[in-house]
Amino acid sequence: MYAVLTATPNGARIDVVDADGAAVDGSRSMRRLEIPAAVSELERASRPRWVWDSTARWYPELLRAGIRVDRCHDLRLCHTILRSSELTADSVLARAAAGEWDVPLDDVQPSTGPADSATLFDLLAVDSPPGEDEPGTAVADELRAQLAAVAGAEAPGRIRLLLAAESAGALSAAEMSFDGLPFDAAIHDRVLTELLGSRPRDGDRPERLEALADVVRRTLDSPDLHPDSPAELLRALRRAGVPATSTRQWELKSIDHPAIPPLLEYKKLSRLLSANGWTWMDTWIREGRFHPEYVPGGVVTGRWAAKGGGALQLPGQVRGAVVADPGWKLVVADAAQLEPRVLAALSGDDAMASAGRGKDLYQGLVDRGVVDTRASAKVAMLGAMYGATQGQAGRLMPRLAKAYPQAIGMVENAARAGEQGKQVTTRLGRSSPLPGEAWLAAQADARAEDAGDAARARARSAARDWGRFTRNFIVQGSAAEWALCWMAHLRSSLRELGGGPTGPHLVFFLHDEVMVHTPEATADAVRDAVHAAAAAAGRSLFGTFPVDFPVTTAIVDSYADAK
DNA sequence: GGCGGAGGCGCC
DNA sequence: AGGGCGCCTCCGCC
C-alpha cells in the first residue's frame, strides 16, 4: 500500500493508493503543522510505503518531530534511474520530454538540525503553486508512470529492487544526517594541537607548521617562499636543483633532496589544517556530532556523494575523534574485496568466486598460482576494473584474463561498449549516461574524410577514456547496489532491535563500510545483524550464485581502533 | 570583488 | 601511469 504525500498551498494531502496506483479510499488534507501527527498515525496503523517527491525535502522535518518511517518511494531518485535505464527505455516515462522530475532538487533544501527557525513546511507552503490541478495529481501521476515503467521492464524484479534500495538509502541518509556521527571535539583539538601546534588566531599558521615552512625556506634558500603556492614552490625547487615537474607528493617522494622530507611533512599537515582543522571543527561539529549531508544517487554510478565537511573523505588522522558515547559502542563493518566479488558474481565466473570463498579473495588468487603475492593480486584486480594498460597492473592483465576469462571478458565488453558510445547497465538496472556532445563531435571529426592524425588521436583517446568509465561503471555501480541492499537489510534489523536515537542506529556509510552506534547491550546483536544483512544482500542481487560477501566487523569505542 | 578552472590530495 | 567523488587554495579573468 502506498501513501502519497503531496504539498498543498496550506499544508499537505495524503492519498492512499493500491499497488497499481489506483486510489483506495478517501484522501485527507491537513495544515502543515498537522503533517507529522498524520504521518505518524498512518505509519503506526498500516506501515504504508510513503511516496513523496523527495525524501530530502520531507523526511528531515519528520525526523525533527521524532517520526521515523519504515519504507518509502523517492520519486525523484527513482525517476532518474528509470529515465536512463536500458531496462525501461521503451516506457512512456523514458520517452517523454524532460520535465519537472528531471530537475535536480537543489533549491528548498533544508539543512538538518534543530536550530533552524524557518521550517521546511513554511517553505513548501510558500512554494506550492495555487494550482489549477487537483492537489496530489502530479505526484500520484508520477507514481503511476513509474509503476507502469517498472511493470513493462524486461526484468521488473531487478529494477523494483533497485528502486526500493535507492529509496531505503534515502531514508538512511536523512537519518544519518539527522543523528550525526559521534565526534569528540576535545580529542580532535588534542590531535590538532599535537600535530600542528596550538590553535592560532585566525589566518595565522600554527607554530609547528610555520617552523616546517621555515625549514623548507632555509633548505631551498628562498627566504620569502610561500609554500602553499604551487607555482612559487616549483620555481624554488628548480632553483635549488630539484628536478621536479610538479609539486605533487608522489613525484616529490622519489626525489632525494634535503628539502623534500620537511616539504612533504608540511604539505601533509597543511592539508590537515585546511581540510579538517579548527575551522572545520567549528563549522561541522555540533554538540558532539558531525552532521554531513549525504546525497544518495549523487554519483552517476549510484554511489552516494556527500556535501558539507567532506564526510566521505574523513582522513585517518581524524578518525580517533569518532568515539562512542559512554555506555555505547561503535560497530564498524567493512565488506572485504567487495568489487572483485561483485564482478565474479556479475559475470558468473565460478573460478573467481571460488577463489574468494571462505577467505581473502586476493590471497585466493595467490593460492591458485595466478599471481605471486597478495599485493600483486590486488593491483591486478583493481587494474582490471579500472582499465589499467600500463605498469605492473597492465603487465598482469594477460594472466588474469587467462585464469578468469568470464570476469575479465565482462569488463572488456563493457569497455568496448563505452568506446562505441553505448550504454552499459548494472546488475539491478542502473544504466550509464551517454557520452556528451563534445565526445560525439570528436568521434564524428575523426570519421570525416579529411580527418587529420591529431583529430583521430583525440577521438581514440576520448573513446578509450569513456570505455574505462563504462568498464568501471558496471562494477562500481553493482557494488553500490549491493551496499544499498546491505544497508537496507541492516536498517530493518536495527529497527527490530529498537533502532532510532535511543537504540542502535546507522551513523556512517562509506561505499563498502557501515558504522552503527549502539548501546553496549545490543552491540553483539548488531554485529550479527551486519553479517546477516551482508548475506541477504548477496542473495538479493545474485540469488543462489555461490559467491561469498564476507564482512569484517569490529566493536570499538573509537573509529581509529577498527582497523 | 566574485567566479571558475587548475593543482593538489583526502576517501573508496 | 587507471575509475568515482568533494573541497581546499591559488590564480587568472571579468
Image (cartoon, coloured by chain):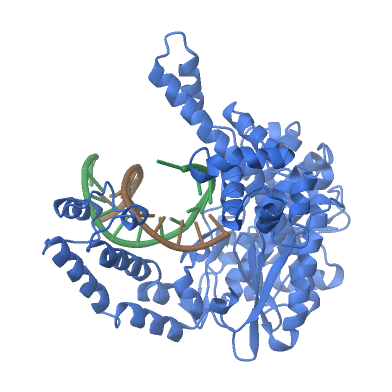
Chain colours: A blue, B brown, C green
Picture coordinates of residue A87, whole percent (x, y) = 75, 37
- Picture residue at 23% right of the left edge, 48% below the top: A243
Viewer-nearest residue: A41 or A523: A523
Position of A246 with respect to A457 (left or right) is left
Residue A73 can be seen, yes or no: no
Viewer-nearest residue: A53 or A323: A323
Picture coordinates of residue A144, whole percent (x, y) = 79, 44
Q: How many marks?
A: 0
- Picture residue at 49% right of the left edge, 25% below the top: A460
Write down the quadrant of residue A88 in the picture.
Answer: top right
Work out whether A217 lies above or below A117: above
Picture coordinates of residue A210, whole percent (x, y) = 22, 73
Position of A430 with respect to A385 (left or right) is right
Which residue is most to the top? A449
Which residue is most to the bottom? A327
Write down the quadrant of residue A179 in the picture.
Answer: bottom right
Viewer-nearest residue: A314 or A411: A411
- Picture residue at 86% right of the left edge, 67% below the top: A46
Work out whether A171 lies above or below A184: above
Residue A412 can be seen, yes or no: yes
Work out whether A47 lies above or below A188: above
Write down the quadrant of residue A557 in the picture.
Answer: bottom right
Position of A387 with respect to A414 (left or right) is left
Picture coordinates of residue A68, whole percent (x, y) = 72, 72
Work out whether A470 lies above or below A2: above
Q: Quadrant of the C terminus of chain A?
A: bottom right
Q: Quadrant of the N terminus of chain A?
A: bottom right
